[in-house]
Image (spheres, grey):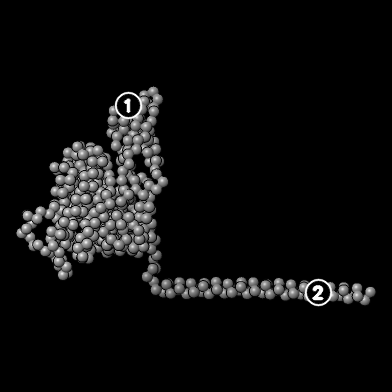
């Protein structure tokens, strides 16, 4: 078991799983994996959105317990990726008319940025802001501070999502008693993990093929230019396969083992005409299986191509398209996207562009861990939390292990409890006595009035 304190912990909320990781950033730029954990989330998260909070809380608690068991120490806080179908970018521009060739100051830029953040719709919130450039006069500037001008225009790319996304995340972590160190939009940290500096500078589209969503992010000149989430993913293909009369687990296994996004009947003739899962008697024609897969894969690829066109950067992506995520493992998915988008350069990013060191884990290069790696690299603070019972904790008592002291404390608590109960009974009896006195006094007064009235009326009758 590992025992360390200089680690960073992260959790990703996905449509197929909630995954946690703890690792250390090394001086050579690599990361060392210290612990990993995951829980199935397919029954309570849809398209990256939480819809069963109690199940999510249970899974988060389990993730932390597993990480702490492997680390042999407590996790005090975690970095969290935020995603979901509603995640997208919105362009916004802020303009300022300046007087007498005003020299642009950092305070002016901050004021422009603040004004940009203040513009939000009723049910959406800004998760992050990516400044594009500033138009000073008629010239575009990346760093306008210090330039004299009569006019400045700030251009921003706001990453927005429904307000319920963040609120539900924060609520679940709060109920699980897990502190959030910081939240990052998942597509940004994924790009940080898998895209090289050259790809981001010369221009590329990152396509993250997830379980129920596909995210398209476009970069140019090291700046995010466009982001969109398509509500389609690998699970859609799996559910389509179940139409061939099989359970979802069987369908997933057949997709992984025999699936092909571009099935050629002639070149595949040497393969068996029928296939079946290892743990079932279900048999299906190979061409039928791949006809179903290809139909949905083509829809996903066509949507990816369309989103890249909507970005306006189709002809500016010199580094082409980079695909990652679990869906990138489907055979010929890269070739299908190449054909649909008419892009020559396609790269599959199964792992980060930096070295990942791990002695225990071998399944780190399937494209499904890249967001977690990005969160680790983005984290800036260690997540270790000293345990309350550790000797170096000044709040720890000197006699915590003294059984006699515990016994005396228990006796004192019992005595105090008895005293409080006795006082309570005494007060209740006093209240009861006063009520009785009041009642008796009221009855005596009423009796006296009646007696007096009778005497008066009797005297009148005698007269």
Pick the residue in front: 251 or 179: 251
Residue shown at the point (67%, 72%) measured from the top left = 435
Where 183 falls versus 92 (above or below)?
below
Pick the front one: 149 or 328: 328
Kindly report the distance in space between the C-alpha atoms of the residues bearing marks 2 and 1.
102 Å
Which x, y percent locates residue 171?
Answer: 38, 57
Which tag, 2 or 1, sits closer to the chain's start?
1
Q: Which residue lies furthest to the left in this view?
A: 270
Percent coordinates x, y for residue 216 in the rendering: 24, 46
- Comparing 65 with 99, the one in front is 99
Q: In this view, does 346 lie to the left or right of 116?
A: left
Answer yes or no: is residue 414 visible: yes
Which SS class for mark 2? helix
Q: What element carries label 1?
A: loop
Residue placed at 40% from the left, 41% from the top?
Answer: 118
Image location (x, y in percent) of residue 410? 45, 73
The residue at the far right in this view is 463
Picture residue at 20% right of the left edge, 60% below the top: 241
Q: In which quarter of the image is residue 445?
A: bottom right
Disc 2: which residue: 450
Q: Quadrant of the C terminus?
A: bottom right
For disc 2, the neighbor class at 10 Å (few under 14, some 14 to 19, many from 20) is: few
Q: In this view, does 365 lie to the left or right of 410?
A: left
Do residues under tags 2 and 1 come within 8 Å of each other at their CB atoms? Answer: no
Mark linked to residue 137: 1
Residue 359 appears anywhere in the view: no
Crowding near the residue tagged with mark 1, few <14, some 14–19, many ≥20 C-alpha atoms within 10 Å: few
Q: How many marks?
A: 2
Q: Name the residue located 6 percent from the left edge and 54 percent from the top edge.
A: 267
Note whether 418 is above or below 253 in the view shown: below
């Amino acid at each position: 078991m590992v025992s360390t304190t200089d680690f960073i912990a992260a959790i990703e909320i996905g449509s197929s799983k909630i995954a946690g990781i703890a690792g250390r950033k090394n001086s050579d730029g690599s990361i060392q994996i210290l612990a990993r954990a995951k829980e199935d989330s397919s029954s309570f998260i849809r398209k990256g959105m939480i819809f069963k909070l109690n199940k999510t809380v249970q899974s988060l608690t389990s993730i932390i317990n597993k990480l702490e068991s492997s680390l042999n120490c407590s996790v005090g806080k975690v970095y969290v990726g935020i995603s979901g179908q509603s995640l997208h970018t919105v362009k916004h521009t802020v303009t300022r008319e300046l007087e007498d060739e005003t020299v642009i100051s950092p305070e002016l830029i901050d004021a422009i940025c603040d004004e940009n953040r203040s513009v939000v719709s009723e049910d959406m919130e800004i998760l992050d802001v990516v400044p594009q450039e500033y138009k000073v006069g008629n010239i575009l500037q990346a760093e306008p501070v210090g330039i004299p001008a009569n006019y400045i225009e700030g251009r921003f790319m706001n990453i927005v999502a429904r307000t319920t996304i963040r609120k539900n995340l924060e609520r679940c972590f709060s109920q699980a008693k897990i502190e959030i160190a910081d939240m990052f939009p998942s597509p940004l940290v994924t790009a940080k993990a898998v895209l090289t500096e050259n790809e981001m500078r010369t221009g590329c589209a990152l396509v993250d093929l997830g379980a129920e969503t596909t995210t398209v992010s476009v970069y140019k000149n090291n700046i995010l230019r466009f982001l969109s989430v398509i509500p389609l993913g690998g699970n859609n293909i799996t559910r389509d396969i179940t139409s061939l009369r099989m359970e979802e687990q069987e369908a997933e296994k057949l997709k992984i083992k025999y699936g092909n996004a571009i099935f050629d009947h002639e070149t595949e003739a040497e393969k068996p005409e029928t296939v079946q899962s290892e743990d079932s008697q279900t048999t299906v024609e190979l061409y039928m299986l791949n006809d179903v897969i290809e139909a949905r894969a083509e829809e996903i690829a066509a949507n990816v191509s369309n989103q890249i066109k909507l970005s306006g950067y189709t002809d500016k992506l010199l580094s082409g398209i980079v695909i990652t995520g679990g869906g990138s493992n489907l055979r010929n998915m890269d070739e299908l996207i190449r054909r649909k988008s008419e892009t020559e350069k396609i790269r599959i990013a199964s792992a980060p562009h930096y070295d990942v060191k791990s002695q225990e884990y071998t399944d780190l290069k399937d494209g499904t861990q890249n967001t977690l790696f990005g969160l680790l690299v983005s984290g800036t603070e260690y997540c270790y939390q000293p345990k309350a019972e550790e000797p170096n904790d000044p709040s720890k008592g000197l006699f915590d292990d003294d059984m006699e002291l515990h016994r005396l404390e228990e006796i004192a608590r019992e005595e105090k409890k008895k005293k409080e109960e006795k006082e309570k009974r005494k007060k209740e009896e006093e209240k009861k006595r006063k009520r009785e006195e009041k009642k008796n006094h009221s009855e005596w007064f009423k009796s006296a009035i009646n007696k007096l009235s009778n005497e008066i009326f009797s005297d009148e009758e005698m007269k």
